[in-house]
Image (cartoon, grey):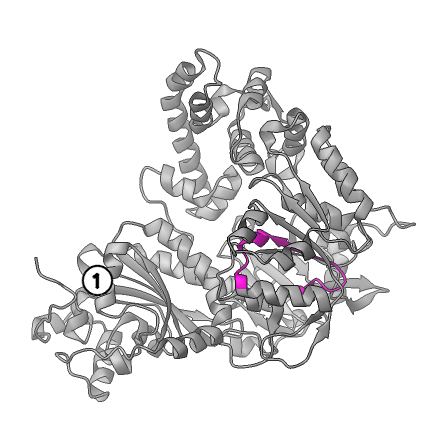
Amino acid sequence: MRDDANHVDTPLVQHEAEWLTPSIQKSHQRSETFGLSALMRPDYDVLPAAELALKLEQSRILCAHATPVMESLHEQIVNTQNVIVLTDAEGLILHSIGDDDFLRRAEKVALRPGANWAEQQQGTNAIGTAIAECCPTVVHGAQHYLAANRFLTCSSVPILGPYGDLIGVLDVTGDHRSYHQHTMALAKMSAQMIENHLFTNTFRETLQIAFHGRAEFLGTLMEGIAAFTCDGRFLSANRSAQFQLGLPLTALRAHTLSSLFGLSSAQLIDRLRANRDRHLSLNLNTGAVVCANVEFRRAVLADGGWSHKPSSEARPDALRAPKPTAPAAPLSRLSYLDTGDPQVANVIAKVRKVIGKDIPILITGETGTGKELLAQAIHNDSPRRSGSFVAVNCASIPESLIESELFGYEEGAFTGARRKGAVGKLLQANGGTLFLDEIGDMPYPLQVRLLRVLQERLVNPLGSTKSIPVDIAIVCATHRDLREMIAQNRFREDLYYRLNGLVVKLPPLRERTDLASVIQKMLQCESLGDADGASLNVDSEVMTLFKQCAWPGNFRQLGNLLRTASAMVDADGQIRHEHLPDDFFEDLDNAGTAPPGTIDAVARQSARLQDVAVFAITAAVAKHHGNVSAAARSLGISRNTIYRKMPAPPCTDD
């Protein structure tokens, strides 16, 4: 068996060159101009580790938003002999993930961090050509200029920054013999997700309008997003917004809120107050009518005008509500969480005694027991309730990026960064509460910096010599045994004793005595109710099974189960055996807690339920015109579930 990575084909013959597209032909001409030869040995110009670390630092914001999207994309194309690559605007590979066996082959052609795939180095290839043309590009097999790369097929999509500049490329590369036509669609969708994440993160303190001609596309990748200053000056718009407005970004910069949507900021506020529907109806300058969601980020209405308050955030719902005649007492979220379990009641009683006394709180417990809900409740019942509640999951941020997320960075040369730098989570929480979830997963070197901040109450953003004072309350959470980690030198003992002013433990769901009350509250949540607002309830036999379940996933498992069952219920709104997923009964069976005959009864229903599920998913995707995100949202399930259940590959969101 030959090694395709080392195999060298002969130059293109005439009949092979005839199927080159015009853009590929232009790229081949550029490759010749660069002095490259089709038979030359590729020069990948791989950077040394120190120089690569500097490039990663410069592109940290891009990597932070792209990495989770790349991982999600990998889950959709796993075992397809592909590698997913992220590059900067010059074609330097920053990050790559993929199937292990193909990654080993890809290493031979330097599809790894530090390698450069600009056209000047590699000739015609999807990454370099996408950068040169600034458009999505597929380079298939023999279309590559260098013969050494012709065993590959690459699909690349440029990633544009919030201000419309090229900041990187997302690429999917695989063996040319296993190329699938849907690969480019998935790459485009993923790149658009990255762009939208960067956009909303960049324009945090602005007026944002999300809009589309069809209401069901709001909240999906198809929605347009435009950002304005509070007085209506245009800032930027994502690609979908540019398409719907019929103008490129350069032309939109001359416009205002009034010239694009036909109303001023004050008029928009009045519309929000008067509106009782879920969405606003707005008129575009093109004459089209769109549905819109309007969000005033980190701004509040005061005396008929705008005033900025970094520590508070007003939602459209608040703007619509009539002004109360007297200040209303805030809802005690701790009281809301007290649903009758003695262990939880004991935790709440302890917490109430230290709220507002500058005593750090450490919440322990299994994953999914509601640690973040308790932290949010502590904040909402504290004197800091008017400040920000800022949550940081130390386990979900790559180790190379968590420092910039916490401390922020100064204005500088960070690819994809905001022009004035970025405020870290510590400063965002100034005047409020910082919640450090999974504190046990914080990198050991960073624990030293956090300890210094907690002791000195001063923050130094990356690249800055200035110390900024901060006033924050600290709440941490972990499912790990920190004392054991200290013994293993994986967690600093001095930081531990700085964080554990009050340590409380939330019980797992299987030990709680208030399961019925908890389930009833969860079913009352709007996200679990049906479109008609009909009340939901649980059949008594099903409730008995719920009480026998060990719930290894705790509230996450219960919430997903109820959400799925709620989508399956009949007109009476009652959740019965046939509405529960098969794996729930498998868990009961494995634990030996299922009543006799239950598993057999479910097995007889299983085939019918699978058919019902496939039918419901197919109908929802058709109803939403192939929009998988909208269909998943309407059913209350994940997009991955739709991809897994569909009898054939569904339409993408592109």
Q: Residue at (53%, 57%) from the top-left corner?
A: 223
Compared to residue 185, the image places residue 568 above or below, namely: above
Q: Which residue is mark 1?
A: 105
How far across and down, in percent of the image, does residue 40 sit?
A: 15, 80
Instruction: Depth check: give the residue in front, 588 or 240.
Output: 588
Which residue is nearer to you in this view: 596 or 168? 596
Apparent side of residue 433 relative to residue 399 in the rendered image (left or right): right
Locate residue 468: give its quadrant: bottom right
Q: Position of residue 561 (x, y in %)?
A: 52, 32
Is residue 180 something that shows in the picture? no
Q: Is residue 509 above or below residue 125?
A: above
**How many residues crowd mark 1 within 10 Å: few (<14), some (14–19), many (20+)?**
some
Residue at position x 59%, y 69% from top? 202
- Report the amino acid beneath label 1: Arg
- Please report the residue visible at 56 percent of the width from the left and 33 percent of the height from the top: 558
Left or right: 646 as drawn, with respect to 496: left
Q: Which residues are magenta?
A: 425-444
Position in image of residue 438 (x %, y %): 57, 51
Query: From the viewer's perspective, is residue 66 above or below residue 359?
Result: below
Q: Is residue 168 visible from the viewing direction of this image?
A: yes
